[in-house]
Amino acid sequence: MRLIDYFERGLRYYPDRACLIDMNGEHTYQDVAERSHQTANAMISAGLKPEDTVAILSPNCALAFEVWIGAARAGGAWVGLAALASVDENIFVINSRKTEWLFYHSSFEDEIEKIKEQCPNLKYIFCLDSQDKSHPYFLDHISKFERRSPELPYYRDKVISHFTSGGTTGQPKGAMWSNLTWEAWCANMYAHMPIHKPPVHLVASAMSHGAGVFAWPTLAYGGTVVCIPRAEPLAVMEAMDKYRVTHTFLPPTVIYMMLAHQRINEYDFSAMDYFVYGGAPMSTHKVKQAMDIFGPCMTQIYGQAECPCTIGILSPDDHLNALNDPDKEGRLLSCGRPPVFVKVEMMDDEGKILETGEWGEIVVRGTLVSLGYYGDLEATKANQAHGWHHTGDIGYKDKDGFIYIVDRKKDMIISGGLNVFPIEIERLIWSHPAVQDCAVIGVPDEKWGEAVKAVIELKSGQSVTEKEIISLCKEKLSAYKAPKTVEVWNELPRSGVGKVLKRKVREHFWVGIDRKI
């Protein structure tokens, strides 16, 4: 199937059902279909060819999603720009993808001139939501085009989306998804998260990442996509109640803030089928608390820009089994099992597939894997060594096939010749009642080479001492894993989707040091 075919299926069976909802109103499938044809015609008439890139810079909103649908209808490759990224980061993405089309929300008007000046490939720039800005208004522009666009052929290996990698090791790369990549992802979702009733998917975290990806399989069932500008806890809870949301995707940090919110018991979450979390691990006691509040709907996913969302799935049933059987409770620390349409193994540095229980790099194979990185054959080749996609994550599988991530490969600390994986220490520090979040890193040390350091963000109004954190770690872990030092920061640096940028934390302590490990 082509990406647009998921929308077409919803349109065929439910033309009058609400397709997109945001703070400005509701749009039916028929309304969105007509404008998507006009958008496609506008692009095609200006010379857009299949695989040409189309960028969108916007907070979550219905018109931004409409442009994505229209671009898919024209065969254009969507480039999602992170609304919370810096203007320089987005300029890099636009230029590295050789993008000619940009649709922006009026809230980015102050940045648009700099973008235009520094992105020479841009030919067509439109404001999504206002007639009074420096560039033409999107809806005015497409109004003169026909409401029926030509049918494009199906090319399963044509690039239809560019998803930006996390960029934790330098400038972000563009993972190229084909129609077949999307098909594998949707098949995994339908197999492991079956739809029981007309779905309502809430896009609260960034549309340019996982929240937007989850919307497309929802559309095939005539689902409604509700967009709110940002994942502010109260706004999320209000939307879940008001629209009877069945699906949403959020990082654990937002879920933690919701669980701690004083008004959480005022809202009805009973419609939820799948409350999906990912992007970072979630502590066991928080998972239990979430199940008490939101019901048997918690679903963990493990994915990357290069392998969308379903390298591993811990389903609602997996969560329930783990909570009801003390022998299985440890599975809550896993990211689930590989779904049916992807193969996942652990590999050593020589390319050998490892046995059950052995630690190695998590590698993935199947049509779920992206085609590679746009314009970067060297990085693509390195990432696909030995015929597998290399995630850069260290993990293992237990005898039942559940995957456990122990760390990012590059995050490993070598202290006194011993390998230290930060995630083990971070999970313990997260359990402290005063801690909101933390990052454990290696810092330069004359004796140890690298010394283990914990940088902590506290919950509002809380306090903790360095001695208290170190004692907690020494009590539960080998002494060499305990942090040598602890710092408290007001706020840890985060990416546009809420992940702690450990690279930024680490850079703070390695300034002026030539050797980084």
Image: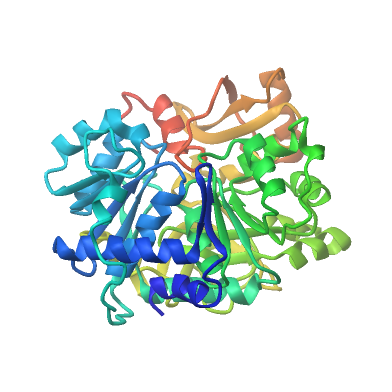
Residue at far left of view = 120
How many numbered marks are there? 0
* Side of 455 where 36 appears, left or right: left
Q: Position of residue 407 (x, y in %)?
A: 54, 50
Quadrant for the C terminus, please: top left
* Side of 260 where 414 appears, left or right: left
User: Image point 67% across, 54% down: which residue?
Assistant: 245
User: Image point 14% across, 64% down: which residue?
Assistant: 47
In this view, 483 is above or below 230: above
Q: Position of residue 219 (x, y in %)?
A: 52, 67
Looking at the picture, the colour scheme in use is: rainbow
Q: Position of residue 239 (x, y in %)?
A: 65, 45
Front in this rendered view, residue 32 or 230: 32
Front in this rendered view, residue 180 or 65: 65
Q: Which quadrant of the view contains residue 432? A: top right
* Side of 86 where 476 appears, left or right: right
Front in this rendered view, residue 55 or 286: 55
Residue 349 visible in image: no
Q: Which quadrant of the view contains residue 228? A: top right
User: Image point 73% across, 27% down: which residue?
Assistant: 471
Q: Position of residue 348 (x, y in %)?
A: 47, 66
User: Image point 63% across, 49% down: which residue?
Assistant: 281
Front in this rendered view, residue 89 or 489: 89
In this view, 384 is above or below 415: below
Residue 490 visible in image: yes
In this view, 156 is above or below 490: below
Quadrant for the N terminus, please: bottom left
